[in-house]
Amino acid sequence: MKGVAALITVIILGAILTLIGISMTLTSINEGQMTLSDSKQKKNQSLLDSCAEQSLYQINIANTLPPVVTTSEGNCDSVVNSQVGTSWDFNLNTTGEMSPLTVNIVLNRGTSISISSWTDQ
């Protein structure tokens, strides 16, 4: 009888320790996924910011905006909504490794660039 009680105790303790181990493993995996997701989101935002800077440079230097803005971090698609005289309204889009990011920029290009609106969408 004492052997049966000891065996049941060992099985119950083993089950509890296994449950705790699995819970800790799943928690660690979840934390790792959240960290990776945050890292990719920041990388995607950095890409969009680089594309915005490059597009402002292109508009300032050449008064044109190519359909694909290329930076050292990657590429973004640009869509000119309107360009009348010195007034520009355009979107920059990136798909990156996470959900797509878009920014709408409205500016006036005179002797310098004056940004009227910068809207993350």
Image: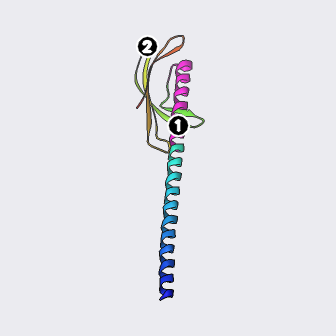
Name the residue at 48% across, 62% down: 23
Name the residue at 47% across, 31% down: 67
Q: Is residue 29 above or below residue 75?
A: below
- Say what secondary structure mark 1 lies in: strand
Is most of the magenta stretch helix, strand or loop?
Answer: helix
Give, as a three-letter code, the residue at label 1: Asn
Q: Does the magenta stretch include residue 63?
A: yes
Q: In which quarter of the image is the C terminus?
A: top left
Q: Residue furthest top?
A: 111
Sequence order check: which comes first, mark 2 or mark 1? 1
The crowding category of the residue bearing disc 2, from other C-alpha atoms within 10 Å (few below 14, some 14 to 19, many at least 20), is: few
The crowding category of the residue bearing disc 1, from other C-alpha atoms within 10 Å (few below 14, some 14 to 19, many at least 20), is: some
Q: Decide which of 73, 5 is in the foreground and name it.
A: 5
The quarter holding residue 60 reads top right
The quarter holding residue 105 reads top left
Q: Decide which of 94, 44 is in the foreground and name it.
A: 44
Name the residue at 50% across, 35% down: 76
Name the residue at 48% across, 72% down: 15
Tell me the magenta residue range.
Answer: 40-64
Give, as a three-letter code, the residue at label 2: Gly
Q: Which mark is residue 75?
A: 1
Q: Does the magenta stretch include residue 90?
A: no
Q: Decide which of 69, 21 is in the foreground and name it.
A: 21
Q: Is residue 25 above or below residue 65?
A: below
The spot of residue 21 in percent (x, y) is: 52, 65
The spot of residue 10 in percent (x, y) is: 51, 78
Q: Which mark is residue 85?
A: 2
